[in-house]
Image (tube, rainbow, N blue to C red):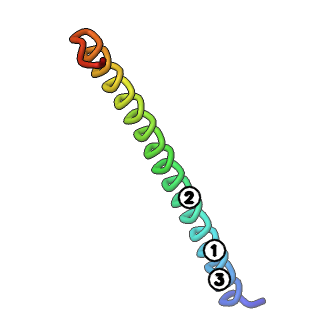
Amino acid sequence: MDNSQNLSYQAGQAKGQAQEKGNQMMDRAANAAQSAKESLQEAGQQVQAKAQGAADAVKNATGLNK
């Protein structure tokens, strides 16, 4: 293999490795975004449940729940 072929081979290897690194980073970013979305959804559900509990408590205290 002459020098230009060797350099071409090395360039191809470097390109492939860079593409794989980029794919891994994109996967990590997507996973982080999905995790954040799920955390926010769970937090929203907890807030909604607490608000409903508070509304029910007010209704019970004022007799509007009967």
Q: Is residue 53 above or below residue 46?
A: above
34 vs 57, left or right, is: right
Q: Position of residue 7 (x, y in %)?
A: 65, 82
- Residue for point 61% across, 79% down: 11
- Residue for point 78% across, 89% down: 1
Q: Residue furthest front?
A: 66
Instruction: Report how far apart the C-alphas of labels 2 and 3 lie in the structure.
Output: 30 Å
| Secondary-structure class at tag 2 | helix
| Secondary-structure class at tag 1 | helix
In front here: 17 or 61?
61
Q: Position of residue 19 (x, y in %)?
A: 58, 71
- Residue for point 70% across, 84% down: 6
Q: Position of residue 62 (x, y in %)?
A: 21, 11
- The total number of labels drawn is 3
Residue that badge 1 annotates: 16
Which label's residue is closer to the chain start, 2 or 3? 3
Q: Residue 27, labelled with which disc?
A: 2
65 vs 31, left or right, is: left
Residue type at mark 3 is Leu
Dot in front, 1 or 3: 1
| Secondary-structure class at tag 3 | helix
Residue that badge 3 annotates: 7
Which label's residue is closer to the chain start, 1 or 3? 3
